């Protein structure tokens, strides 16, 4: 489940509150690497994880280089691990296999 740490963005599904899914976990997490948008509490189907992607820092200055490959109607995309609640990230990395590039 997608998690947005900004409380003001946990309810509205506005463009300014959207979080990006990326084309690649090894490219900077910016608009050039943005493939689709998701919002707080969206459910995504995760398939595998990588632990050595580009480090992403959230609005609370927490960071991780873990990325989760997810199935989205746009295809197989990547969600930065920082966009999951910390306890969910621990569960996901325990259960899912490592992605074979």
Image: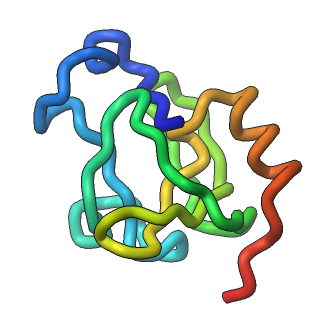
Task: Name, please, the residue furthest toward the top.
Answer: 7
Pick the front one: 90 or 32: 90
**Where in the figure is residue 72, as x and y percent of width and height?**
39, 62
97, above or below 81, in the image: below
Q: Residue at x 43, y 28 (%)?
A: 41
Q: With 64 as the anchor, is 76 left or right in this view?
A: left
Quadrant in the rendering for residue 89: top right
Q: Residue at x 57, y 36 (%)?
A: 84
Q: Residue at x 49, y 49 (%)?
A: 44
Quarter of the picture holding the C terminus: bottom right
Q: With 18 as the anchor, is 23 left or right in this view?
A: right
Quadrant in the rendering for residue 96: bottom right
**Where in the figure is residue 67, as x and y percent of width and height?**
61, 59
Question: How many numbered dots are placed on residues in this image?
Answer: 0
Q: Residue at x 65, y 56 (%)?
A: 65
Task: Name, please, the residue furthest toward the bottom.
Answer: 101
Indicate the colouring scheme.
Answer: rainbow
13, above or below 52, in the image: above
Pick the front one: 60 or 98: 98
Pick the front one: 14 or 56: 14
Task: Name, please, the residue furthest toward the left.
Answer: 15
**Where in the figure is residue 48, as x and y percent of width and height?**
70, 66
Quadrant in the rendering for residue 27: bottom left
**Where in the figure is residue 10, as x and y percent of width and height?**
33, 17
47, above or below 3, in the image: below
């Amino acid at each position: 489940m997608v998690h947005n740490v900004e409380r003001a963005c946990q309810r509205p599904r506005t463009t300014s509150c959207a979080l990006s899914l990326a084309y690649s976990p090894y490219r900077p997490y910016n608009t050039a690497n943005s493939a689709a948008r998701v919002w707080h509490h969206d459910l995504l189907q995760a398939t595998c994880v990588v632990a050595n992607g580009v480090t992403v820092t959230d609005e609370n200055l927490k960071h991780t280089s873990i990325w989760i490959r997810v199935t989205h109607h746009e295809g197989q995309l990547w969600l930065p691990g920082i966009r999951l609640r910390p306890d969910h990230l621990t569960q996901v990395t325990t259960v899912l296999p490592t992605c074979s590039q």
